[in-house]
Image (tube, rainbow, N blue to C red):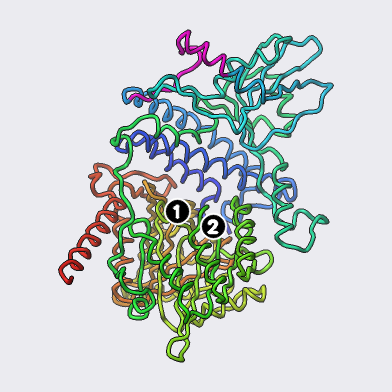
Amino acid sequence: MKYKCFENRELSWLRFNGRVLEEAQCPANPLLERLSFTSIFQSNLDEFFRVRVGNLLRKQELDPKKRDSLSKMKPKSQLKAIYEKVRTMAPARDAAYHQIMQELRAEGLEQISVHAATPSEQIMLSEWFKREVRPVSMPVIIDKGKPFPYLRDRKLYVVLRLESKSGIRMGILPVADQRQRIIRLGAGGRFILAEDVILAYAHTAFANSRVIDRTILRITRSASITPEDIGDLRTGDYRVDMEMMLQERKRLPVVRVELSETFYQPALEYLCKKLGVTDDQVFYAKAPLDLSFVSECKNLVQNPKLLYERMVPQKSAMVQENRSMFPQIRKKDILLSYPYESIRPFLRLLDEAADDSKVISIKITLYRMARDSRVIAALCEAAGRGKEVTALTELRARFDEEGNIEWSKALERAGVHVIYGPENYKVHSKLLLITRKNRGKTESFTQIGTGNYNEKTAAMYTDYCLMTADPQIAEDASHVFEALCRNELPQPQTDLLVAPYGLLPPVLEMIDGEIAHAENGEEAYIGLRMNGLCDKTVMKKLVEASQAGVRIELLVRGICCILPRMPELTENIEVRSVVGRYLEHARVYFFGVPGRMKVYLGSADFMPRNTVKRVEVCAPVKDAELKERLYSEFKLQFNDPVKARYRTEDGEYHLPEGGNPADNSQETLHRAAYARAEQMEQQEEHEA
């Protein structure tokens, strides 16, 4: 059955990226931050093509008649809709970029072209090309008599059409990785991009040929591959197989071609044929094809008003810095809210566990870690001190595979027992269990998070970290780790919701509970805060709840495949999405009205990849004060009059009108964290 209130997953994601682009267009945002949003929009789109479009092209080849379960669209129809939508978004991205750069000129930051450079600057740029490019870049001639060269994923190339009497003849010059992207012109903020210089002087590398046309080219390759896809190459050593898979991924098919200029059509058709793409997969951009350089622009102009007001994670009012973490957690559950509060108490817990002679074992699931990870350092230190340390390292964390492979080797060298979990199921949970002997008794401390054990993202993503000494939660966590150590999927637990077997059933049961309340004429409520919602089973149940009169509030940052406010279907469902200076990443579920509300937090969005294809862990929040805090923060964001876009039944998102920028929920939460930290310091000074 096709539900007219369900939307295609891929098109829903494109709507989300449109909201990112709106932040680049928003005049209330500082200029350099708006510039960063253009880069985020582009990098998001890159990953979308690599993963989602790559998957669809694969499905089109293997099973072209299989329809999407939500929209009933075949792969070909989905691809067509994606290409059309992306093509309509490109002009808005280009316009936003050029508008921002135009406004930045008044602040001393100016991107220029070679033609706009002064004669002396043009001489300098010509010398730069001769000195920095020609010695290291090998020009490649393409014609019918030569094999087509391998082009690297998301790298820039200058392509020239060369005069030829015998057919298509082209020259390619790579924009090398090691070369600077930004070339400064003088001591100020005037700059030119390396690819523009190479484009202007590339003809000198093909001195014996007349150049007729030129463009900058960038391709995107599919990343749709799993360890199982390497077939007979598999060795049986999972880590080795992952390394082989990463090598194979570099040569996957091209899914998109981007050009900076229109190009001679027969030559473009020849390129497309060699790259294995259709005309639909060719896109033009008037903004730079690679916007990763914009982070460097912050170093070219020094003006605080061009950036967000500096805010740093604050001390948690729940944690005393002069006391060990163990007795504090034993006394009361502790909740940290990133990036408003610092990750330091959690890191201190790990450091203390490594140093404490009473700690017997540490078990943790690792998905994405920081480059210089203090978490890894603490685990290695604990193993070095003779403690039993087990780390499930998820090698399939997409685009973090290489880093995780290296971390797994480092952990093993330190004496950590490294495991990888059940075959074909990613372990996406954020779970830590510390076991300790205290006065002859065993006690356990469990941490459940909504985000990764990553110090860098803890300062950029909104997430929660719950630390508890609850014995039932610890027992459940122990069962989860026991199953993972046996390469098995965990069974349903008593308190913890654990996918793939023990998450959906209790969630559906709690929704049914709210339906029963509504049918009895009582107030019923469901609130969900997450990154994505496209699990059809959950959405059908939410429609049923809406039809029964349950009030449902969905705060979903990214993909949301349910359309609200549709008569007789979703008229009791409201959908909001917050996109702002911090990436909304927390997952929290609320079932029931205050007074009988059940609250859970954890790692799972309500998407099939989370609910049935991964190991996810969500924990009940039992402390009444913490439940109230989580709900009040949810409502604050849901009712944000500045950044909480509200969705209408046609699927579109709309910004509130006339909201006071000071009421931005993310800024409000950070100011509240500052106030709590200041109050705590004053209290400590008074007690001293």
Q: Which residue is mark 1?
A: 457
Visible in this render: residue 75?
A: no
Left or right, residue 199 beside residue 292: right
Q: Position of residue 351 (x, y in %)?
A: 45, 68
Residue located 54% across and 57% down the image: 368
Q: Amino acid at mark 2?
A: Arg
Residue 121 in magenta stretch: yes
Q: CA distance from mark 2 to mark 1?
A: 10 Å
Quick one: which residue is furthest to the left in this view? 686
Q: At x 37% / y 53%, what residue is drawn?
A: 576
Q: Measured along the vertical axis of the image, is residue 192 above or below residue 351?
A: above
- Residue 407 image position (x, y, % from top left): 60, 59
Is the C-beta separation of discs 2 and 1 under 8 Å? Answer: yes
Rendered position, 592 above or below 584: below
Q: Please indicate, yes or no, whether residue 654 appears anywhere in the rendered image.
A: yes
Q: Secondary structure at mark 2?
A: loop
Give the residue type at disc 1.
Thr
Query: Residue at 67% across / 22% down in the picture?
Result: 135
**Start and end of the magenta stretch?**
108-128
Q: Quadrant of the C terminus?
A: bottom left
Q: Which mark is residue 368?
A: 2
